[in-house]
Image (spheres, rainbow, N blue to C red):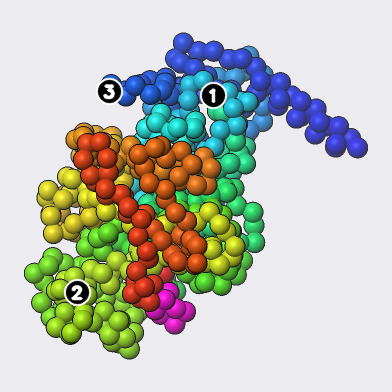
Amino acid sequence: MLLYLLTLVGLQVQAQSSSQTVTSPLGPVVNLGYAAFAGNTTSPSGIQDGPVTFFGNIPYAEAPTGNLRFRAPKALDETPVSRGQLKVEDARNWGPACVQQPAVVGIGSEDCLKLNIWKPSNATEDSKLPVVVYIHGGGFVAGSPQGFPLYDWVAKSAGPIIGVSIAYRMSLLGFLAGSSVSADGDLNAGLLDQRAALEWVQRHIVKFGGDPENVGIAGESAGGAAVVMQMVAFAGQKKVPFRRAMAHSIGFGPMPNASLIAETFKNVASAAGCSTTGQSVMECLRGASIGAIVSAINHIPAGHLSPIVEGPSGFLPDLPSQLLSTGKFAPVEFMGGHCTNDGRTFVGGRPEQFQTEADVRRLVFSRWPGVSNNTINKALQLYPSPEEPGSPFTTQYDRAWTMAQDIIFGCMDWLTADRLTTKGERNVFSFRWNAPDAVLFAANPFQGVMHTSDLYFLFDGTKYAMAHTVLSLSTECRDSSGPNALSTFTPFNASEATLSNEAIAYWTSFTSSGDPSTQRGPSRITWNRFNGKGGASARIVPTRGDSSLTATKMEKYPAAEIQRCRFWMGADVVSETRV
C-alpha cells in the first residue's frame, strides 16, 4: 500500500510538473516534466501551408559513449523536476549525424541518439494527432535524418499529423557482433536504438499533440529493412509500439553469418589496436579513441557490419524472410513497394558489362557468396536468356538487373504484403514507383527509375551522395563535404511538384487512417488494396504526368514476378541469400 501511495504521489508530481506553462524567448516550448524544449515555428519561402513548429536534437536515450559503447541504449533519467530547476533546451536545429561509413574524424558523432519532431503549431496535448516516425536508410552504415525533412508531410497533410525522424547508431558502433559482444555488450544496438526512440514517442508524443495509440513507422532501403525488422522483432511475441508501417525498397544484403561475424570482429579489434593489449577486448574497444574507431570502420567492407540473426531469445531470432513466412510478426497495417528499376543501382555493373550469361553469374551473384551453383542454375532458368523464344528480357543486362531487384527489394515487399493479408490484415497496400530522380537520371539515364527515386519526390528533391554511393558499391563521390549532413535538395518543376503533392497526400492519408485514399483529393485515383476483390493482388504505379495531373494508375501484380518471388523467398534459397 505504501508503495502504491508513493507511486500515486510521483505520478501527481509528474503531472503537475509537466503541465506547468514554461516560456522562452527562443520559441514555443513543450514541457515534458523532466526537460523542456524550445522549437522553431516557420513556413519556408513558397510554402503557404502551415505554420509548422519544428523541434530538433531531442535526446531519446543517454549518449552511447564510454562504458555505454556497444551496449543497448540506456534510458534517460525522466524524473520530473520543479519549474525552478527546469532548463529550457534550444531545440531549433537538427541533432548531429551518427558516425558514418566511410568514416572521417569530425563527420558524425557518437552522441547522436536524438530525434526531431514537426507538429502543426496549433496542436496541443488534447489534439491526439496521428504520428509517423521516419527511419532513414543508407545500408546501415550511412545517412542521417537531415536528408528527410517531414515539414511538407505535416504542412500539406489534409488531416493534421505529427512527423518524427530518428537517428540511430550504424556500422561498427551500431552493429558490431561476435561472442565478445554477446558476453559484454548487446547485439543489434542500432535496431535497439530505433526501438528506444519508438518507446520514447509512446511516452512523450502526446505533449506535442500526438496520439501514442496511432503511430506509424516508415523507412526506405535499409530504413525499409528496419521497418520489417521492427515488425518481426522477438518473433512477434512482444507488442510493437506502432500500428502501421510503410516500407520503401526494403533493402537486404546477405545478413552476416557466424564466420563473417567472427572475421569482422577480429579485424575490428586489430585495426583499433585491441588485439594484443592486456585488457579485455571489449574494455579496450570501449576505451578506444574515436580516431581508432574511425580507422577500424574504414578497414571493414560495406555490408560486413549490419543487423544479424541473434537466435531464439534475441531481437532478431531468425532471418526476417523466415519470420514473415512462418507468421512470426506483428500484424500491422502496411504500405510497401519499390522503384521500377531499383535493381539497376545494385546489379554490379553497367549495361555494356553484361554480354553473356557468364557475366550475369559473375557480377550479380558476387553479392551473395553463399548462393550455390544449383540455385544460380535454377535462377537462370527462371529468368530466361534473351536469346530464348518468349523471354521477357531484351538484353543480359535487363535479365541481370531484374534478378538483382527481385532478390534485394521487390520480393520482400511482396512477401510482407502477402503474409499480412494471409494473416487477416485488411489494410495492406502495394506500389511500384515509376518516376525517376531527375538529378540521378540526368547523370546516368540507363539507370531509369533508380533506387531512391521515390525519396526525391517525397522529400523536396533530396539526394544523399555518400549513402547512395556506399550502397551502390561505387567508388565515385566519396568526399565528405557538403551542406546539411551531405544532403542536397533540388527544386521541382511543375510536373514534379504535381507528383510530389499527390504522393505526399497518399502517404499522409495512410499515416492518418491506414488507407492512402481516404484523403486523396478529387483528382487522384483510388489506391486499391493489395488483395482486392476475387483475391487479385494489385499495386499503384505513381508516374509523372503534366503540371496539373499525374499519370498514376493501378496495375495487377504480374504473375511472373510473383512466381520469381516465391522462388527467392523459399526457405532453401533464403538460407543461402540470408535475407
- Count the marks: 3
Q: Nearer the viewer, residue 496 or 286?
A: 496
- Real-space CA distance between mark 3 and mark 2, rounded to the nearest whole angstrom: 45 Å
Question: Comparing marks 3 and 2, which lies closer to the viewer?
Answer: 2
**Is residue 568 magenta-colored?**
yes
Whether 273 is drawn above or below 44: the answer is: below
Q: Which residue is mark 3?
A: 46
In primary-sequence order, the first of circles 3 and 2 is: 3
Q: Percent position (x, y) of residue 300?
A: 30, 62
The residue stretch that appears in magenta: 565-574
- Real-space CA distance between mark 1 and mark 2, rounded to the nearest whole angstrom: 53 Å
In primary-sequence order, the first of circles 1 and 3 is: 3
Whether 202 is drawn above or below 317: the answer is: above
Asked which quadrant contains residue 523, the reply is top left
Q: Nearer the viewer, residue 352 or 487?
A: 352
Asked whether the residues under the numbered discs 3 and 2 touch, taking CB atoms below 8 Å apart as contact, a structural biologist would say: no
Name the amino acid type tagged 3: Gly
Whether 88 is drawn above or below 280: the answer is: above
**Residue at horizontal 52%, vertical 72%?**
325
Residue 101 visible in the picture:
no
**Left or right of 241, for residue 490:** left
Q: For the residue labelled by badge 2, is the local secondary structure a helix, a strand or a loop?
A: loop
Whether 252 is drawn above or below 494: the answer is: below
Q: Percent position (x, y) of residue 327?
A: 58, 68
Q: Percent position (x, y) of residue 522?
A: 39, 37
Q: Which residue is mark 2?
A: 393
**Is residue 233 magenta-colored?**
no
Which class describes the residues within 10 Å of circle 2: few (<14), some (14-19), or many (20+)? some
In primary-sequence order, the first of circles 1 and 2 is: 1
Our reading of the magenta stretch's main secondary structure is helix
Q: Which residue is mark 1?
A: 123
